[in-house]
Amino acid sequence: MLKVDNTVFQLAEIESNISSTTFNITDFVRRNGNDGKYCSLTISLNHMSNIVIEEIKTTLHCAIDRVIIKASQNVTHKLYIGRKSERKQNY
């Protein structure tokens, strides 16, 4: 059973700005022959370009956790930059 940390809830804080999300998870064999888990998260934002985050880790939990952390940081940054540019336009 997969245990998901509180990192999933990081996306909940910015949920109102997200129109859809897509998770892709597959097994991955690296060049050195070691197995890994590939996780891709695509986030479609309202009135902004999509964000795609990809990660390969040894365990599924690590891959999902890392993708969610990166996605949350990217979305938050993108929204901050967007709000900052809106304020400049209003002055």
Image (tube, grey):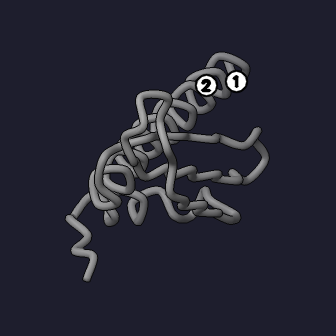
Residue 76 percent coordinates (x, y): 46, 39
Residue shown at 50% from the left, 57% from the top = 27
Give the side of residue 68 with respect to residue 38, left or right: left
Judging by the rendered image, the residue that carries numbered circle 2 is 87
How many circles with numbers are drawn on the protein? 2
Judging by the rendered image, the residue that carries numbered circle 1 is 90
12 up-or-down from 43: above or below? below
60 up-or-down from 77: above or below? below
Res 36 label? none
Residue 11 percent coordinates (x, y): 42, 59
Secondary structure found at label 1: helix
Residue shown at 49% from the left, 29% from the top = 31
Instruction: Please tell me in which quadrant of the rendered image residue 64 appears.
Output: bottom left
Question: As shown in the figure, which amino acid type bears the numbered disc 2?
Answer: Arg
46 up-or-down from 87: above or below? below
Secondary structure found at label 2: helix
State the residue lying farthest toward the front: 33
Residue shown at 51% from the left, 64% from the top = 15
Q: Nearer the viewer, residue 16 or 39?
A: 39
Q: Do the residues labelled 1 and 2 touch (CB within 8 Å)?
A: yes
Residue shown at 43% from the left, 41% from the top = 56
